[in-house]
Amino acid sequence: MGTIELVATRYRPEQDVQPWEQRYTVPCSEDMSLLDALNYIKDELDPSLSHRWSCRMAICGSCGVMVNGEPKLSCKTFLRDYREAGVVQVRALDNLPVERDLVADISGVVEHIEAVKPWLIRHSTAPVDTAHTQTPEQMARYHAFSQCINCALCYAACPQFGRNPAFLGPAALTLAQRYNLDSRDEGSSERMPWLNAEEGVWSCTFVGYCSEVCPKDVDPASAINRGKVASDINYGVNLFRLLRGKSDA
Amino acid sequence: MRKPWQPQQPRDWWLHNPAYRRYMLREATALPLMLYTLLLLAGIFQFSRGEVAFAAWLSWMQTPAALLLQGIALAAALLHAVTWVALVPKILVIDSDRLRIDPRQVLRAHQLGALAGNLGLVVATLWLLWPAGGA
C-alpha cells in the first residue's frame, strides 16, 4: 500500500479570513475511496477537518466535494484513479457558501427544490380502496428524473447558478419535470409559473456539465431543455386562451 | 456564530474545465458567423454602389485573408450544427400514450433533414451559377 498527497481547502470561520490549503499524506490502496481518506485524516491526523458524509454508498447525497476541480461524491471517488495525477485536491462544492472546510451550505438549493412543489398534486381524489395505477411505460417517462438524491453536484457544475444564485437550477427544474411527467399528477399548472419564470428553464444555456457530473445518471440538462419545450407549449396555450377571453391555463 | 465564506465566480471560470471550454467554443461559433454576415452585408452594400465596387468586393473576398475568414466561419457553422443536432434527442422527446417515436429515429430524421437542406443549397447554388442553367 502506497501513499498519496491530499490537499484540502480549509476554512475555519472562527479564525480564518479566507480559505487556505492544507496538505496531508494518506494511505492509498486499491479499494480506498476519497471518503475513506477524509475519515482517515479526521481519525488519525487532524480531528479539526470538517466534512459531511453518511451512507458511504452514493444514496444519501451528503458527501459532495470538488475533486481536482470536478464535483464528485467522495464515497464514489477512488484514490486509485488519482495515482497518475499524484495529488488529490479537495474543496467544498463550488457556487455555494462554505460553512466550514469541505462543508458547503446547500440550504439555498433545498429551498429551490421545495419551491417547485416536488410531490404528487391531486385535485380529484380516488376512493380509498382504489390505487392510482400506472403502466410501466408511463413510469419509464419520469423514472430517470426520480433518481435525484439532492447532492447538489449539478449546482456546483452549473456556471449559470454560479452567476445567479436565484436560478432555480438543475435539480429543482428536473424534479418539476419529474412530477409534470407523472401520469398520476395533476399539479403541472402550479409548477409552470416556476418553469416559465426568468429564474426557471430559460436561464439554462445548455452547458450540459450537470448531466456529466450527476452520480445517479439523472440527466438534468435533458429535463430542463424538455422543460423549455413544455414552457413554449404552455405559452402558446395561454396566448390562445387569453385571446379567447379566458384566464391562464 | 455562523460566518460562511461566500465564493465569487471568477471571470475566467470557463478556462479551468474541459467541459466549460467545449461549451464556450460552441457559444463562440456565433462570432465568426457574425463576421461572415457583416462581410455579406458589405457585399450587398457594394452591389448597390455599382458594378466596379461589387467586382472589387468579389476579388477581395478571394484574397487569402478573406478565404481564411470564410473557412473559419464554415468550420464554426459546421461545429455548431453537428453539436446542436446531436443534442436533439435530449430535448425533443416524443413519448405519450398516443405517440411514441424512438429517440434514435428523431435524431436520424434531424441529421437527414440537415444533410438534405445543406446539399440542396449547394445544388441550387451550382445550378444558378452554371452558365446554361438559371437563365
Image (tube, rainbow, N blue to C red):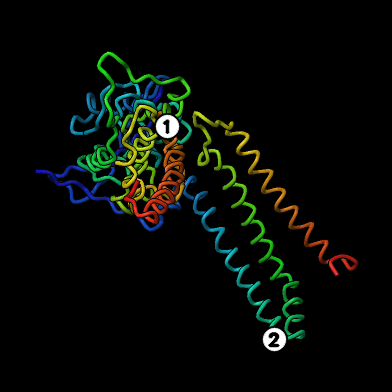
Question: Is residue B50 visible to us here?
Answer: yes
According to the picture, the residue beneath numbered tag 1 turns out to be A218
A127 or B116, nearer to the observer? A127
Identify the residue at image location x=89%, y=68%. B131
Identify the residue at image location x=53%, y=54%. B25
Q: Residue furthest front?
A: A244
Residue A39, percent from left and from top:
26, 25
Query: Residue A242 is drawn in which quadrant?
Result: bottom left
According to the picture, the residue beneath numbered tag 2 turns out to be B49
Residue A79, percent from left and from top:
40, 27
Mark whose residue sits in front, 1 or 2: 2
Q: Secondary structure at mark 2?
A: helix
Residue A10, percent from left and from top:
24, 41
Question: Is residue A79 visible to us here?
Answer: no
In the rendered image, residues at marks 1 and 2 fall on the same chain: no
Q: Chain of mark 2?
A: B
Is A162 positioned to the left or the right of B123 in the image?
left
Q: Chain of mark 1?
A: A
User: Label 1 crowding class (10 Å Cα cut-off): few <14, some 14-19, many 20+?
Assistant: many
